[in-house]
């Protein structure tokens, strides 16, 4: 399977603070790649660097065979990359339908906006029921569905999903993960950033664990040992190291 996106020796951060330290990873076309890790590990920073939201200090990002590091965000969107951000980031004072239509405003998708709207409503029936309501009236789970639907309206080649389960009730988390699995089965290429290891492993094809701005684990999801993953996640491998003589 071809690699749709490759990140090589990437360094990025905020101001004088570096967060990512020579991170390298890739995502295969038609697969769901999950990036796990504790808070502050660099997961969201990585997503922002890929999208051009923060500058890349060194390293490479290749999308569809082309170098895209430090490409403006609007060019990444035009090339077919969409990001469903942490915290949903919907337009709360606009209707559900207008939020979705904004996602379909990308030039390549604009002619099919109405068709894509019906596809979004088919995937998220509750959004169709609430299409004339203000987005601010939705529940947290419905807001997450709206953010996902808006991203799909762009007809993306690559979908970056950042912490979709954050702040949601367990039953809603299950629903969101079911939707992601459905997208994966449709052949969508997805990079999922998540903290819920158990749920992520249920839908992922490949797993990376990012801690302290570095990749400390890279394995097919089917091969992941959960106990070892949790030891790395919580840095118990460091805690349990013997003291040097």
Image: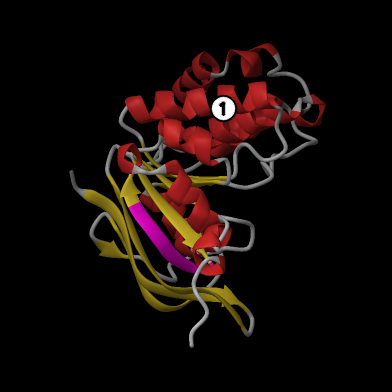
| Quadrant of image for the N terminus | top left
Q: In the displayed structure, does residue 118 sit left or right of residue 129?
A: left
Q: In this view, does 29 lie above or below 210?
A: above
The secondary structure that most of the magenta stretch takes on is: strand
Q: In the displayed structure, does residue 137 sit left or right of residue 228?
A: right
- The image quadrant that residue 88 belongs to is top right
Q: Can residue 107 be seen in this view?
A: no
Q: In this view, does 90 lie above or below 122?
A: below
Q: Position of residue 68 (x, y in %)?
A: 36, 65
Query: Quick one: 213 or 180, which is closer to the camera?
Result: 213
Q: Where is residue 176 in the image (x, y as percent from the top left)?
A: 56, 27
Residue 107 is inside the magenta segment: no
- The image quadrant that residue 96 belongs to is top right
The residue under the point 43% across, 67% down is 71
The residue under the point 30% across, 31% down is 187
Q: Mark 1 points at which residue?
A: 176
Residue 217 is inside the magenta segment: yes
- The image quadrant that residue 99 belongs to is top right
Query: What residue range appears in magenta?
Result: 212-218
What SS does tag 1 mark? helix
Query: Quick one: 240 or 122, which is closer to the camera?
Result: 240
Q: Position of residue 193 (x, y in %)?
A: 52, 48
Query: Quick one: 110 or 167, which is closer to the camera?
Result: 167
Q: Is residue 194 visible?
A: yes
The residue under the point 60% across, 38% down is 164
Q: Position of residue 144 (x, y in %)?
A: 64, 32
């Amino acid at each position: 399977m071809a690699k749709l996106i490759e990140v090589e020796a990437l360094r990025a951060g905020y101001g004088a603070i570096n967060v990512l330290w020579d991170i390298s990873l890739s995502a295969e076309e038609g697969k769901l790649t999950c990036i796990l890790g504790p808070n502050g590990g660099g997961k969201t920073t990585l997503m922002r660097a890929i999208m051009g939201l923060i500058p890349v200090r060194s390293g490479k990002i290749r999308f569809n065979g082309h170098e895209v590091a430090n490409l403006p965000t609007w060019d990444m969107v035009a090339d077919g990359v969409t990001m469903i951000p942490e915290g949903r980031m919907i337009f709360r004072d606009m209707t559900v339908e207008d939020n979705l239509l904004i996602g379909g405003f990308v030039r390549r998708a604009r002619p099919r906006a109405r068709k894509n709207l019906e596809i979004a409503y088919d995937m998220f029936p509750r959004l169709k029921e609430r299409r004339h309501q203000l987005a601010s009236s939705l529940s947290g789970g419905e807001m997450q569905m709206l953010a996902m639907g808006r991203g799909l309206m762009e007809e993306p080649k690559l979908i970056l999903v950042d912490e979709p389960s954050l702040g949601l009730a367990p039953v809603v988390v299950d629903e969101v993960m079911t939707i992601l699995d459905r997208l994966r089965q449709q052949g969508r290429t997805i990079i999922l950033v998540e903290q819920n290891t158990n749920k992520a492993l249920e839908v992922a094809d490949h797993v990376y664990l990012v801690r302290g701005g570095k990749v400390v684990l890279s394995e097919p999801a089917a091969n992941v040992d959960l106990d070892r993953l949790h030891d790395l996640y919580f840095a118990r491998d460091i805690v349990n190291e013997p003291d040097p003589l």
